[in-house]
Image (cartoon, rainbow, N blue to C red):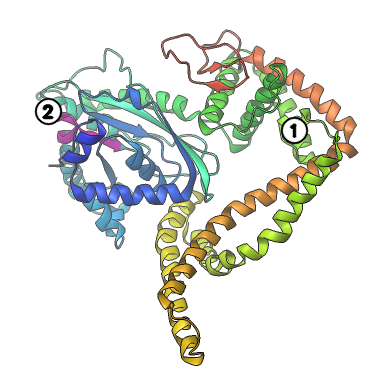
Amino acid sequence: MVSVSKLTPRGAYDSLVPRMYRFLVGLARLIVRLFFRSVEVVGVEHIPEDGGGILVSWHPNGIVDPGLILTHFPAQVVFGARDGLFRVPLFGTIIRMLGTVPIARAKDGGSDADRRAANARAMDALAGAVAGGSYSCLFPEGDSHDRPNLLELKTGAARFYYRARQISKAKRPVIIPVGLHYDHKRAFRSNALITFHPPLEIPEELDLSPREDEDPDVGRDRARELTSHIDRVLRNVVHATESWELHHLMHRARKLVRAERALRAGSIDLGPSGMEERILGFARVWAGYYSKLQHEPEQVLELTERVREYDEDMRALGLEDHELDRDPRFASPWLYAILVLQVVLVFLLLPPILFVGYLVNGPTALVVWGASKLGAKRMKDEASIKALLGSLLFPATWAGIGVFAYKAHVFLNVLFPTMPDGAFLSAVTAVALSILGGMLALRYLRVARETVRSVRVRLTRNRRRSAIRRLRLERAELHEALIELSADLDLPGEVTPSGRVRLPADPSGGADQVS
């Protein structure tokens, strides 16, 4: 039987959870912090503190998905994972130590009888933990993937829920949908958002505990109906779209609405949006699109085509939506001097300092990148390989540099006896410079891109004033059309006076009707 602690305040949680679990989660948390630039968490208040439950999520990013939930859920959580992962060297040992329960899949081979028996034992272990007030997490698609929408859900999560209800002696467990969102799921140092949604509202005809003498066919039909209900909720949670092209266009619509709204609010320098604001803005566009598509498909398709043309023009100019509102002329020669100084700093002074970082970390980064390309069967596996392999190879590289620096100092000290002793200090310095140089190298690429964009924006806008004026007008018209698209809908989040979108201070209050 799997033993999992209940959701408790942090101090009590640390005292109840096994030390090895805390150690492994702490290690995973460090890897997550290094891999992602930022991870935002929303909706922890939706997790009940007086009962167990099941977390259900879609599965777009390999082992990164459970890694995010594992490191940001405020209690111990047990996962069900395909049994093939337990045969992976080292990784299989780690997930066993985390309490993960193996799930056998039909496509992985083996006899049906053995698979059903093994899965029954696994389900009883997980269900027993949940019935006792703990938490488990399942990915009901049964496989990770690269699509912008859900695969067909398996009935395992529903059957698991009913098994937990059947053996529960206290409060019935809840089902908590979890939204996982990535801005660039394969990229190192990207951003992620985890959203814990309110417990699932189960229809009355499905909200019951199975009887021991119940007809198996009745139980299977009920599990299929609950699975369909979970499917509908998860599609809303992840904002599923038919294609990545449509997904991209909705993000463009979100950005142009935000920029126009900020302009009208007098907040031109609104700053970049966080992951929470991006997903809320996307959800508002998504809700308007699919609501209107049912009743006025021709109007929606026409608007989609206009957004596509606007997007192509913006990408051709190399501009972001908010950059249409900035003055292309410098009002003072000092601004020219600042830009020149920025170029000199970024492209002349920093490269020598970063040379060590690239020299030491570059080969390892290429190995990790190459392994992710060659070893990933699908795009969703790339981030998993990068995170796992990078967490092993980069520390090994830094340790190797430290040993090399130590031995090199000893060797030079023999050749030049007057050289001060300090082999250990040399090793520590080399390791520190390698780590610092690697961190600066990551940041430098972003700063360099921003500097190039700053120069390009000024030059491009001065050459193409007429295109900018046209796009400003088009953005304003598209803004009005998108607002109308979502009129009379209960949209998620609220719009602040500055033009940002955020979760309402009072979650029970009504949503603002601006898209």
The residue that appears at 48% across and 16% down in the rendered structure is 504
Asked if one can make out residue 395 in the rendered structure from this viewpoint, the answer is: yes
Picture coordinates of residue 471 (x, y %)? Answer: 81, 27
> From the viewer's perspective, is residue 52 above or below residue 394?
above
Q: Nearer the viewer, residue 139 or 459?
A: 459
Task: Kindly identify which numbered label has been placed on residue 18.
Answer: none
Q: Which residue is mark 2?
A: 167
Outermost residue on the bottom side: it is: 415
> From the viewer's perspective, is residue 95 above or below residue 417?
above
Whether residue 397 sits left or right of residue 475 in the image: it is left
The residue that appears at 86% across and 32% down in the rendered structure is 467
Task: Kindly identify which numbered label has been placed on residue 323.
Answer: 1
Whether residue 109 sits left or right of residue 439 in the image: it is left
Q: Residues within 10 Å of mark 1 (few under 14, many from 20)?
A: some
Q: Which residues are magenta?
A: 128-137
Q: Are marks 2 and 1 in contact (CB under 8 Å)?
A: no
Is label 2 in a helix, a strand or a loop?
A: helix
Q: Nearer the viewer, residue 471 or 494?
A: 494
Identity, as a three-letter code, of the amino acid under mark 2:
Ile
**Residue 260 magenta:** no
Whether residue 445 sits left or right of residue 72 in the image: it is right
> From the viewer's perspective, is residue 369 above or below residue 201?
below
The image quadrant of residue 482 is: top right
Picture coordinates of residue 216 (x, y %)? Answer: 18, 28
Picture coordinates of residue 220 (x, y %)? Answer: 24, 28
Q: Residues within 10 Å of mark 2 (few under 14, many from 20)?
A: some
Task: Look at discs 2 and 1 and give the one toward the viewer.
Answer: 1
Is label 1 in a helix, a strand or a loop?
A: helix
Identity, as a three-letter code, of the amino acid under mark 1:
Glu
The residue that appears at 47% across and 68% down in the rendered structure is 429
The number of numbered discs placed on residues in the rendered structure image is 2
Image quadrant occupied by the C terminus: top right
